Image: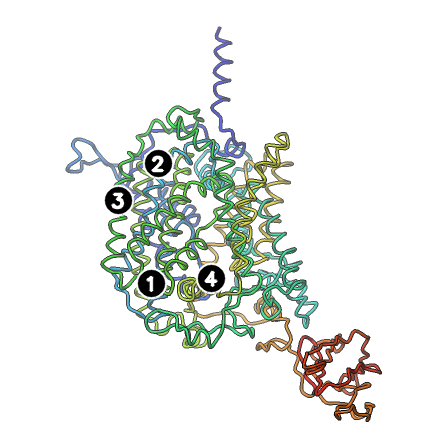
Amino acid sequence: MGEVKSEEAEKRDVEEESPIEEVRLTVSNSDDPTQPVWTFRMWFLGLLSCSLLSFLNQFFGYRTEPLVITQITVQVATLPLGHFMAAVLPTATFRVPGFGSKRFSLNPGPFNRKEHVLITIFANAGSAFGSGSSYAVGIVNIVKAFYGRRISFTASLLLVISTQVLGYGWAGLLKKYVVEPAHMWWPGTLVQVSLFRALHEKDDHRFSRAKFFFIALVCSFSWYVIPGFFFSTLTSISWVCWIFSKSVTAQQLGSGMNGLGLGALTLDWSAVASFLFSPLISPFFAIVNVSVGYAVIVYVVIPIAYWGLNVYSAHSFPIFSSDLFTSQGQEYNISAIVNERFELDIAKYHQQGRIHLSVFFSLTYGFGFATIASTLTHVAFFYGGEIVERYRASTKGKEDIHTKLMKKYKDIPSWWFCVMLGVTLVVSFVLCIFLNDQVQMPWWGLVFASALAFIFTLPISIITATTNQTPGLNIITEYIFGIIYPGRPIANVCFKTYGYISMTQAVSFLSDFKLGHYMKIPPRSMFLVQFIGTMLAGTINISVAWWLLNSINNICHRDLLPEGSPWTCPGDRVFFDASVIWGLVGPRRIFGTHGNYQAMNWFFLGGAIGPILVWLLHKAFPKLSWIPLINLPVLLGATGMMPPATALNYNAWIIVGTIFNFFIFRYRKKWWQRYNYILSAALDAGVAFMAVLLYFTLGLENISLTWWGTNGEHCPLATCPTAKGIAVDGCPKLQLNAVKLATGGRRNSASSSNGVSKINWLSLNIIYNLSLKSSRTVYCLLVYSQCFQALPFVCLITCSIKTRTVNGSVLITLPSPWVSFGECKSHHLVCLFQNTSLLIK
């Protein structure tokens, strides 16, 4: 009988295990509810970490090379501090008035894992969940630094705090659908779980995880001084550019930073993990989706659009750029079209002409449109049934071991989230109604933005929880409000922040809750730490921004700052450009009837249909298990981070991710189980520590090295246009100096009845800049006007044309005889030479 019970107990244990293999291999199935959480150590180190990170990240955010210090730095640094405090703080107990007979101690025992988790959550709030600083600070920056307008500190503070906290309200109400279910496993949290276990659990293995982490950390820390200071070219080893130093096309193909990155390599972990985060923590099927989408877009669509079809006059602009251009390939003068009332100066706009985008930038917007549409249909068809089922049986559904262990702790009452949501909305309404002259956004815009963010929070949370990829709402929010409320750039960025950042904050809030779920942290403790940390970080962010904006002359203005000044605000410059595109000029003049890119709107329809076709294919062939792994929101949004992410970042991320999450996971699973996430954390921490050390020891003293290995990737021609006749500084160009009829050409002296000569043949001497290839195909048109009763006629010369170089000139000989059409009053010879028209009368 006992044997039977043992078998039943074993079966029950197996049933309670997580259905996700990575979770089973990483997360512990045990818990110690007696470990203290609300300790003096946790509050002191948590508040200190949050304050330091929010200050430093905001400070660095204005610099040419911004440094983002994330929670992992604090996670590692606070461990010895916690143990030190546990060793020196007094253990005596005392009473606190108002808490009855309950006794407290500054040192309740050894520094434990749960304290450490809450300190890290504090730090995560200080780094704005890895973003660096609060997104809404960018609005204050562009108002004060770029537009030169007034915004009060009160309005700025309310804007920052309300946009950071608003999404927490509805996120808490959705927690039961995306945190408690075992299939919502949030891959990004496992690296934190693995690191916490390595730092706190006893490991009797000969080569412990803690020892591995320390060795990898030291290696990462030591190595980063090479690409970070001595040899920065190792960040992007674009060897194709080195071989073809004078070829624009080769450098467009080979540049890792400004081109398609063919052959580009990196020996810098920060380049591998930038923008897409560490590839070691992304599941392989997500890497495959990103790889396929990226390869199709970057190596099929873009080359065809640029070199094959010259879509949207692609040759007139760089192949990879987020800048705005005139039709002549010059950088668009944005400030010239903004009047004193934050509105578009129509006359100045027409004087410069329409805004033009690089082909990559324009198609990136198109795929962004498709990503938003596919997100809705993908979740509806693939997860719709599960969502309904979770809703109907949320209290009696099957639970895994982690959810059962969390039942020991008091859950958060729903009214906490409702009150938070209500208070935040009231504060936001006060901002939009009584301070509208500073933020421009009307109250109904706030309602619309909040509704949009709420609708997208659940589907995007599901995608993040299963793929570790998070599609953004920034494009759709800008587009919608630019259509319905154009001409007000600040209103547009405020709407985007309330609609986009509220959703992003909600997803990050839920991700941290999943980390607490795995680490068995009391939910109420998690909630309070997240809320307090966010409020503190937002306040420090705006205070530091206010200090710098009012103390540094000409901050963010590259043309007015002293040579070499680091206060150029690259991120805010892009944010400012976006406010002009979507809020000032408006999408109608970019993607509408008055713009060049109206066809991009068809991507919405294609994105919506795509997941339906995949779902039908899955239903038709249910035995093919790979079909449901086709995640079109991830595939279509693969290049959503480009720019500012580059081909180098993507190539390195894909290669490293495939090595670790396919080959090592399949063939060295035990090693992967023990060390994969530890290695990811060590690499991140080593780079972060060395970057901070380099800045404080060398950067503040303006100490630098200047030699070939610190002068970038050496691809200066990668940003050049390829259309001839477009003159850009630093780029080779075709310059036609003279065109004349050759004196040696034979010309028939016979005249028609009205005295117009008939041409038999002629030669042209064309002198041009020989910095490019000297051999080019020439296409000529013989244009007769007022022929055949005033009807124009064009004849294309299709016969071969001979060219030869003589003393720096190209002699082009047109064969004899040419055609003639009799009674023509005038004629012109038009030659297209290297895409430049030459008119010879």
Question: Are the residues tagged 2 and 4 within 8 Å (C-beta)?
Answer: no
- Residue 751 position in % (x across, y down): 79, 92
Mark 2: secondary structure: loop
State the mark number for residue 140.
1
Tell which tag, 3 or 2, sits nearer the viewer.
3
Residue corresponding to mark 4: 694
Q: Earlier in the sequence, mark 2 or mark 4?
A: 2
Question: Are the residues tagged 2 and 1 within 8 Å (C-beta)?
Answer: no
Label 3 amino acid? Gly
When the figure is inspected, residue 51 is found, relative to residue 359, above or below; the finding is above
Residue corresponding to mark 3: 422
| Residue 49 visible in the shown view | no
* Front residue (pair 480, 244): 480
- Residue 494 position in % (x across, y down): 35, 58
Q: Earlier in the sequence, mark 4 or mark 1?
A: 1
Tell which tag, 4 or 1, sits nearer the viewer.
1
Q: CA distance from mark 3 to mark 1?
A: 25 Å
Q: Earlier in the sequence, mark 3 or mark 4?
A: 3
| Crowd tier of the residue under label 2, counting other residues whose Cα lies within 10 Å: few below 14, some 14–19, many 20 or above | some
Q: Earlier in the sequence, mark 3 or mark 2?
A: 2
Label 2 amino acid? Pro
Residue corresponding to mark 2: 110
Q: Is residue 261 left or right of residue 559?
A: right
Tell which tag, 3 or 1, sits nearer the viewer.
3
